[in-house]
Image (spheres, rainbow, N blue to C red):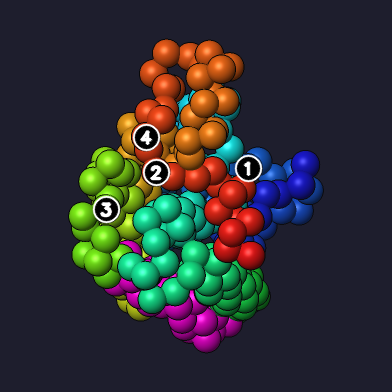
Amino acid sequence: MPLAMAPVTGSVSLAATIDPGARANGCIAYDPYALPPTYGYNPNLVAGIIFTVTFFLSMCGHVYETFGCRNWCNYPAPSFFSAAIYYILGALITTHGRQYSPMSPKWYLIIFITFDLISICVQALGGGLAASASATYPPGDTEPGTRIMTAGIIVQLVSMTVFAFLWVLFLWRARAKVRAERALVLATSFSSLLIVARNLYRVLELSQGWEGELITHELYFAVLDGALMLLAVAVFNLVFPGRYLLGKEEARRQRSMTPRKGCEFPEQRKAITGWEMVGRAV
């Protein structure tokens, strides 16, 4: 039976935890506690189940709204939740006028998704270097990889902070125009704030290293990462963006198709479909 391996932190090696006699017999029982926990704690199973179930239910709610209302404009880039927020701003700009924004809608997607991609790549590079260093015996120096990971998260934090500034700037300039989308504006602002807070936590966490206070205590991770992202996603279950980003022609088509109750779109709503926004932006 092959022995399951796990990342090692500190100076304890896997071989040192195994009895020489048992090792000579060639059959070693798996012991999940044979090595010290990677992050300084054993993850709480109940918390993991709760987050898994609640995120899954939120996803089901989004899928139900999308198919129930027959609208596809909510998530243009499912791999990046922030892209949905960039898209919402672009849609509002296209709806109410380019004069309220310093950039056209397409540039929000191009610029900020590009920075998200850069952030992910830099974090992956740093994580790979740190994992490679910790897998050697004796363990190597994980500091360079950790610093690269931190730099990647800083890129994401700065990018989202700049976007938040542009979001507030647009809302201020178009404050008399966005009243019909007030609920969507509040939900998007709330979600953006939580993402910024979560990124700030991640920067502070990694800046302390792999044995710091934040990374070695699960409560911080559960509250400042898992819970914040859950709220950032779930708020759009309550305020579905598709209800606010449909144009008049689409609203007529929706009514002709008799959508389910609760998905009716007011004809006077001054918005456009997602595909129309992309077409106009390009």
Foreground of the two, 107 or 48: 107
- Residue pointed to by mark 1: 30
Residue at 37 percent across and 70 percent down: it is 99
Q: Position of residue 69 (x, y in %)?
A: 51, 25
Kindly indicate whether the residue at mark 4 contacts the one at mark 2 (C-beta within 8 angstroms).
Answer: yes
Q: Secondary structure at mark 4?
A: loop
Drawn side of residue 87 relative to residue 15, left or right: left
**In the rendered image of this protein, does residue 9 appear above or below residue 86?**
below
Q: CA distance from mark 3 to mark 4?
A: 13 Å
Magenta portion: prevailing SS class: helix
Q: CA distance from mark 2 to mark 1?
A: 62 Å
Q: Secondary structure at mark 3?
A: loop
- The mark nearer the N terminus, 3 or 4, is 3
| Disc 4 residue crowd, few under 14, some 14–19, many 20+, Cα 10 Å | few
Q: Secondary structure at mark 1?
A: loop
Q: CA distance from mark 2 to mark 4?
A: 6 Å
Residue at 23 percent across and 46 percent down: it is 179
Query: What's the mark number on residue 270?
Result: 2
- Residue pointed to by mark 4: 268
Query: Which residues make up the magenta segment?
Result: 139-167
